[in-house]
Every structure is written in structure tokens, then in C-alpha cells.
Image (cartoon, grey):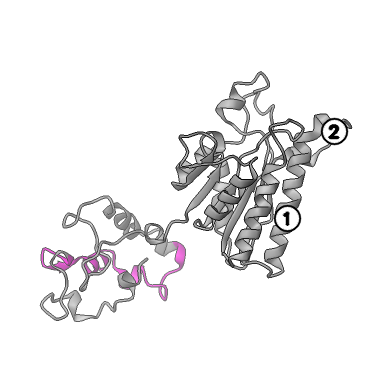
Amino acid sequence: MPCNFFNHNLSDARFYDKEILPSSNDLSFVDGKNQVRDLFERHDAENKLNIHKQDFNTIFKSSFWTELLDSFDKELGKGRIFECAMTCGEKLNKVWDQTMKKTFLVTGGSKGLGAAIVDHYDGISVARGSENKLVADITNSEDIELIAQESLKYDVFVNNAFDGPPGNPWANFAQTNLLLKVYDTWKANNKSGHIINIGSVGEKDIVSAEPDFERYRISKSALAYASKQATRAFKDNLVGFKTTLISPDRLDTELTRSRDSWTGNGISLDEMIRTIDYILSSPENTCVEDITLWVNYQYNV
């Protein structure tokens, strides 16, 4: 909770008399009673919310929290609790609303997983199509430089777009090349933040001895190795930013659902978002190197 909510001493006279200077905002009082003081008294905070008298399980089962959360949906003067019941009259916001949101730059953010990430985090998409806010091609060396420079403006860079099997004339190891360029750029600028690389479980197996068949796996293997090198750089205090590889099995997207091989089982995009949330929630001195998500294709089939 905001400091003003709990750190003001409830013995402060301004909780009882709004005429005492510096006075409360008018809306801090409802029916002559300070909103925060009234909230505490109605839930017997002195006894039932006191960590010296109750364990945390008991405290967090209190209806106090339900009423507090419900107030966020109400209007000022009609049940909305102020952040400061003293002088400023600012609205009380949930602590997760107060925290500055991380900014995201996402390659391939116009469809599939990339679009889900952009939508959830209100990020910026990088792709070839003109509908993207940053139009760039990760197979183009000049565009890779552009993306790397642009990424300096963001907290999180998601290296999601895959350019295609490297044997094709229109494709190369662009995901890996882009990671290395972003890494060098962030290091040169002493940047903090997080690089998240979207890999694949495909790189974990050798299915065929024929390289032409394995080129997707070769490309994703290169990305995985480079990503883990970047993670080690954070561990060894060579850089101030973190790098994490997410290696998912088959995703549940419109594309995979359209294929004959679809069995009704794939990793949901919501699960991928939860994975990113987990990665970003790690302590400042801790970096998740690699998370692999497998799916049972035949589950309940």
C-alpha cells in the first residue's frame, strides 16, 4: 500500500478534526469522519489487523481487504478511498497500479504470440507490415541496427520473430544476429532491462541426420546458446541487464489450430504471458536463464 495510507499515525489529530492545519482535503471526510480512520475502526484494525496480535493468515482473511478493493471501482466522494486522508487528496490506487509499468518492444508483434504480448503489456510491435508502429525486417542488417537502437528506449525487448529456415534465400539466423546486436548495444550504453528470447523445444532434439530437415532446429539452437551466454554475462557482472530464453512446445494459436496435426493441445498464450510475468518478477540480483514448456499432444484426445 502507499506510504501515506499506513504510515500516518492514526493518533494524528487530523484523522479526527479536518480544521487542524495542514488540513485534510474536503473529500477525505465523509459524514464528518475521516475515510481511512473510519475504515480502520469499522474493521477493528487495532486488534484484528494488528500484526502483534494476529497472524498474517487471520489478518488477510479480514473483510477489510475486500472493502478496500471494492472501493477502487467507486467514484470520488462515493466510497473511493483517498491515498492521503490528510492534505493532498490524491486517490488511493492499488500498489500494482502505482508501480510504473514496464515498456515492451516486441518483434513479430502483429500476430500469434507476439500480438498477445503486445496486447497484454501495451507494447510496441516490430515487423515488416505497415500496420506495425516500427516497420523493420529482422533479416536486414540496417534494420537490425535500427531495432537495436530503438530497443534502448524500452525496459523489455522480446526477440520473438522467427525469420524462417536459414537455408531459404530470404532467411538467415536473424533472431540470433538481432540478439547479438541488441546485446552489444545495451552493453555499450550501460543499459539495464531484460531481453527475452523466444526459442523452441525443437532445438533440444535431433530428429534427422539430414541438415536440410534440421535447419529450424539449428537456428533455434544458435539462439539458445547465444541467449545463455548473455545470461552468463549478467551472472558475471559484465552487463547490467538480464537475458532469458523461453523454449515453448507447440503453442495454441490460430495457425497451429489450422494444421492437420492439431490435436486440441497446445501451450496457451496466457501461459506464455504468465511465464514472462514470472521471469520479470525475479529479484534484481537474480536472472532466470531458461524456461522450457512442454505439452502433451495427446492429452484427453
The three-letter code of the residue at mark 2 reads Pro
Residue 56 locus on image (x, y percent):
45, 66
Marking on residue 47: none
Note whether residue 127 is visible.
Answer: yes
Name the one closer to the observer, 135 or 61. 135
Q: What element carries label 1?
A: helix
Label 1: how many Cα within 10 Å (few below 14, some 14–19, many 20+) = some
Residue at position x 13%, y 67% from top?
26
Note whether residue 199 is visible.
Answer: no
Residue 44: say if magenta: yes
Specify which label sits upstream in the sequence, 2 or 1: 2
Residue at position x 61%, y 67% from top?
240
In this picture, residue 5 sits left or right of residue 229:
left
Residue at the far top in the pictured view: 260
Tag 1 residue: 228
The three-letter code of the residue at mark 1 reads Lys
The residue stretch that appears in magenta:
28-57
Residue 97: say if magenta: no
**Alpha-carbon span between mark 2 and mark 1:** 23 Å
Quadrant into which the C terminus falls:
top right
Residue at position x 59%, y 39% from top?
137
Tag 2 residue: 211
Label 2: how many Cα within 10 Å (few below 14, some 14–19, many 20+) = few
In this picture, residue 93 sits left or right of residue 189:
left
